[in-house]
Amino acid sequence: MSLSIRAARLTDLPELVAWNAAMAWETEHRQLDRDTLQRGVAGVFEQPRRGFYLVAERDGVAVGSLLVTYEWSDWRDGDFWWIQSVYVSPDARRGGVFRALYAAVAQRAAAAGAVGVRLYVETENQRAQATYEGLGMQRCHYAMYEAALAGTGGSAD
């Protein structure tokens, strides 16, 4: 069974929206507003400066995806690439899908001159943390804080 990674296309929008909603439910038991989510996913395609999605396919069938966004670091004079909105279909989990997606991100980030790749993970998600550490990622010493602004729907996603 061959696994390939490709840039997401606008035709992937329904699946990306569904996977984001599933990920929010599985990891945080959060029901996302579908209209807001659809606009948010579409916004990446509308303004590429926001980032890009990658899709993993096994034998031509989409089995997972992630979003990459950018953060400028004045300390390092370069961009960090943030991995977000990771989702792998339940039947494809533990089959190297995230490993392949991560390798594609790391390769693209290095080619673009990024200074590093980052992601955040739920503090209780031990399985994901073990996966990231197994790929050579290291826990950093920062804690994340946020302040939701009125009318934005609450905490970070």
Image (spheres, rainbow, N blue to C red):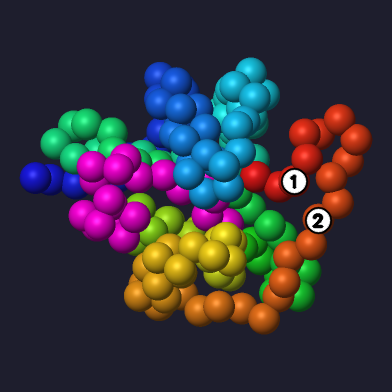
Pointer 1 residue: 155
Image quarter (top left, top right, bottom left or bottom right) of the N terminus: top left
Q: Position of residue 32 (x, y in %)?
A: 62, 30
Pointer 2 residue: 146
Q: Is residue 99 magenta?
A: yes
Kindly identify the amino acid type of the residue bearing the numbered disc 2.
Glu
Kindly identify the amino acid type of the residue bearing the numbered disc 1.
Ser
Q: Residue at x 58, y 66 (%)?
A: 123
Residue 41 found in image quarter: top right
Please tell me which of labels 2 and 1 falls first in the chain: 2
Q: Secondary structure at mark 2?
A: loop
Are the two marked residues, 2 and 1, in contact with CB atoms closer than 8 angstroms? yes
Q: Position of residue 29 (x, y in %)?
A: 57, 42
Front-most of residues 83 and 108: 83
Q: Residue at x 58, y 47 (%)?
A: 28
Front-most of residues 87 and 80: 87
Instruction: Give the extent of the magenta segment.
Output: 82-100
Q: Residue at x 73, y 65 (%)?
A: 144
Instruction: Classify 10 Å Cα crowding around label 1: few (below 14), some (14-19), many (20 and above).
Output: few
